[in-house]
Image (tube, rainbow, N blue to C red):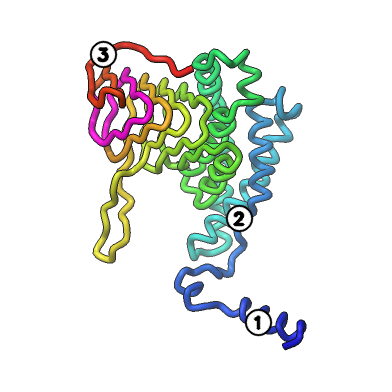
């Protein structure tokens, strides 16, 4: 078979919708959200939050966020729901304005993360270094933005945005997770925070920590149900490197969870859990990892 015949037959085969594609609805006749546009939007978000670092004109950044988001939100809504295009754009416009109004609030809580990251790391020279260099600040900028979009009910876009940060930092935070103020991650590579995780205020994680699910509940068709299945971490908890906290368990406030621990049970407040002793001691002590 000649090159042209091979090329033609291959193109025809790839162009035909397979039964698997049809069952998975992978060829919807709507415009997909544009990842490049969302990358550009996040650059403007960073400029609006940290104008001295990433921008010099907050008005341009804010207007650009609005312009990009209203179009991309409409794409996300249309892709996930079969509704009238006019109502799609009206919904996208309304949710975009709601998001714009939330930007000062998102910035305020993000600044608590910058403070926590800097104050919990002796290697950080100042807040400027944290904003410019630290992956925790980048991932929280993306997460805080994505979580706000998720809360507003904008589909698809939040997950795209958190996966951008995941690919750049190695930190995987689901946009639906609920994370309080003054959240810090040191180093960060390999951190995973699942969808139904709840994290309180002043929580510190080290690299390799997983806040994950232990098992799943399935429906009558054998599909996993989206039920609360990730941990609840109360205020002022520190979890050291390569520890897995799994299932809908509660880690009490002011507790310290040591490194390399596999934890699947509740921990009361003011506890210290150490892998080396394989037990749990009620203590109010502190630990250091660096």
Q: Nearer the viewer, mark 3 or mark 1?
A: 3
| Left or right: where 110 falls relative to 249 | right
Q: Distance between the Cα atoms at labels 3 and 1? A: 68 Å
Residue 183 in the image, given as x and y percentages of width and height? 46, 25
Left or right, residue 239 beside residue 228: right
Q: Give residue 193's quadrant in the image.
A: top left
Closest to the observer, 232 or 123 = 123
**Mark 3 / mark 2, whichever is N-terminal:** 2
Residue name at image x 28 percent, y 48 percent: 215
Residue at x 29%, y 33% (from the top left corner): 263
Q: Nearer the viewer, mark 3 or mark 2?
A: 3
Depicted 28 relative to depicted 290: above or below: below
Q: CA distance from mark 3 to mark 2?
A: 50 Å
Q: Is residue 190 magenta?
A: no
User: Which residues make up the magenta segment?
Assistant: 249-267
Cβ atoms at labels 2 and 1 below 8 Å apart: no
User: Is 150 rendered above or below residue 224?
Assistant: above
For mark 2, what is the residue?
A: 33
The part of the image, by quadrant, that contains residue 214 is top left
Q: Is residue 252 magenta?
A: yes
Name the secondary structure under disc 2. Answer: loop
Q: How many residues crowd around disc 3 within 10 Å: few (fewer than 14), some, or many (20 or more)? A: some
Please tell me whether residue 22 is drawn above or below residue 61 in the rendered image. Answer: below
**Residue at screen point 35% across, 24% down:** 258
Callout 3–callout 2 Cβ contact below 8 Å: no
Element under label 1? helix
Name the residue at 36% across, 22% down: 237
Point out residue 8 in the picture as x, y percentages from the top left corner: 71, 83
Which quadrant would the N terminus be assigned to in this image?
bottom right
Q: Which residue is mark 3?
A: 283
For marks 2 and 1, give the CA distance. Answer: 26 Å
Residue linked to disc 1: 12
């Amino acid at each position: 078979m000649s090159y042209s015949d091979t090329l033609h037959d291959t193109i025809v085969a790839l162009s035909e919708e397979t039964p698997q594609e049809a069952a998975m609805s992978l060829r919807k006749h709507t415009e997909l959200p544009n990842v490049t546009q969302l990358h550009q939007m996040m650059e403007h978000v960073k400029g609006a939050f940290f104008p001295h670092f990433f921008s010099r004109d907050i008005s341009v950044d804010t207007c650009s966020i609005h312009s990009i988001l209203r179009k991309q939100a409409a794409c996300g809504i249309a892709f996930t729901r079969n509704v009238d295009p006019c109502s799609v754009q009206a919904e996208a416009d309304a949710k975009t304005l709601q998001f714009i109004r939330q930007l000062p609030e998102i910035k305020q809580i993000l600044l608590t993360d910058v403070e926590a990251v800097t104050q919990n790391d002796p290697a950080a020279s100042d807040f400027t270094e944290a904003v410019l260099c630290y992956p925790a600040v980048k991932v929280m900028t993306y997460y805080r933005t994505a979580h706000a979009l998720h809360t507003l009910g904008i589909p698809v876009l939040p997950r795209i945005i958190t996966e951008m940060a995941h690919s750049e930092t190695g930190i995987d935070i689901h946009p639906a997770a609920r994370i309080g103020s003054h959240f810090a991650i040191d180093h960060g590579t390999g951190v995973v925070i699942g969808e139904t995780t709840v994290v309180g205020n002043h929580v510190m994680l080290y690299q390799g920590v997983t806040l994950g699910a232990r098992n799943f509940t399935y429906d009558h068709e054998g599909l996993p149900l989206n039920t609360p299945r990730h941990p609840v971490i109360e205020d002022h908890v520190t979890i050291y490197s390569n520890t897995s906290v799994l299932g809908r368990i509660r880690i009490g406030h002011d507790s310290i969870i040591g490194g390399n621990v596999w934890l699947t049970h509740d921990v009361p407040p003011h506890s210290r859990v150490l892998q080396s002793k394989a037990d749990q001691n009620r203590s109010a002590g502190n630990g250091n990892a660096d």
